[in-house]
Image (spheres, helix red, strand yellow):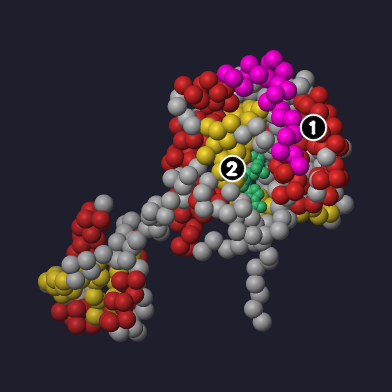
Amino acid sequence: MKISSVKGFHDVLPDESARWSWIEQRAREIFARYGVVEMRLPIVERTELFSRSIGTTTDIVEKEMYTFTDRDGSSITLRPEGTASIVRAYVEHALQTRAPVSKLFYLGPMFRRERPQKGRLRQFSQIGAEVIGRDDPAIDAEVVLLLHDLLEALEIRGARIELNSLGDATCRPAYREALRAFGEAHRDALCENCARRLELNPLRLLDCKVPECRQATAGAPLMLDHLCDACRVHFDAVRAVLAREAVPVQLNPRMVRGLDYYVRTAFEVVAEGLGAQNAVGGGGRYDGLVKELGGPDAAGIGFALGVERLVLAMDDHVAVQSPLPDVFIAPLGTAAESEALHVAHRWRRAGVRVEMTSGGKSLKSQMRLADKVGAPYVIIFGDDELATGTLTVRDMAAKRDFPRAIGLALPGAELRDALAQLAQQTLERSA
Ligand code: HAM
């Protein structure tokens, strides 16, 4: 009986993994331009890390975490996101003592037990960046500029950055109260989930997807109208820098995030062609989080992009493929095969990408294979060639054979040198 993968856990096949590598490589380039360096984080963390940072009344913590009791009785969780882990590591290694500002990126799998659909998986991959140690509006703007550059480099179709301010400990409590009171007044029209969470997490009212709920909350009070002076000044300064740099962002006063640690600047990236799951990324400021997790009073801001959604939203014309072979060796017969294997090994060690198959196959089928793997040259390596010291090289694009009279006794080191030379020419031509 066949064993299939677990629901919501997908394989990335070679055709697609080339796109993944391309995305990761581009992201690394852009991060380097901004001085953002890589952190590699564990996939498993203590459960309380997520409940204390993401918030106990969020969807993620309430119902989506893969949580297990380890053999020693401790509760551990497959990470549902990267920010909490970054902050945990920042505190654990006292990164503030190494540099005043930490600019870090990470990539890798995250786990949320959501209902799978297009663009929504239970294991998905994120590319994220976090800046810890600055609370000025200029860095908020810089992070959005980085995000914008990244989306441009990845050629994401119709990517749009939406921006909002979520206020802070000074102004949000009064706003929450106003929103809760509004929700109470419209309670009968709310979905079960929103009515239940009204007391503990009224902000979620604003991004509920249920149509009746959306209708009922159309006139709900907005955070932007309730910002305190300090939050207003901060937000205006962020927007001013973005306007000066001509980075298009769209104000979305109804945007709230699915994680509780945010304050002030928050943003989301939406893209075309994704259906219901149109958010390719999201992020924002989380000033209290480092302290909450036992560290210094350091401010933080960052974002994460979902790789599966980036792949769906990438422009189709972005032609990405695995590297093609430089040359295909087609051995005919057993003697040729063992010689071909030897030559292929030498060439590969010299940096040549060599593809070959077993000598038991007909020339026709080997040619078909060479064509399929996209080899520009095929070297026909038959017993006759071995005996006469002549190699036939087929230029696949020109569909032309040109016999090379190597004229050497076989099998000899000089033949191999001649082959190495040929490989060198092939390499130079493909460079
Ligand atoms: P998030 O909005 O929960 O934010 O996730 C960021 C992105 O991860 C989403 O926009 C989406 O592309 C992808 N994603 C989330 N869940 C799934 C899923 N089930 N299947 C496929 N893709 C998914 C965060 O995780 C924050 N840590 C971002 C952040 C960094 N904020 C500050 N720093």
The answer to which of 222 and 297 lies nearer the viewer is: 222
Q: Amino acid at mark 2?
A: Gly
- Dot 2 falls on a residue whose secondary structure is strand
Ligand 1 within 8 Å of disc 2? The answer is yes
139 in the magenta segment? no
- Residue 69: image location, x then y, percent: 84, 54
What number of labels is visible? 2
How far across and how far down the image is residue 87, in percent?
69, 34
Q: Is residue 224 magenta?
A: yes
Residue 185, compared with residue 338, is above or below; it is above
In the image, which residues are magenta?
A: 216-237
Local SS, label 1: helix
Viewer-proximal residue among 395 and 167: 167
394 is higher (above) or lower (below) than 220 = below
Which residue is the site of mark 1?
A: 179
Displayed quadrant of residue 384: bottom left
**Residue beneath label 2, please?**
281
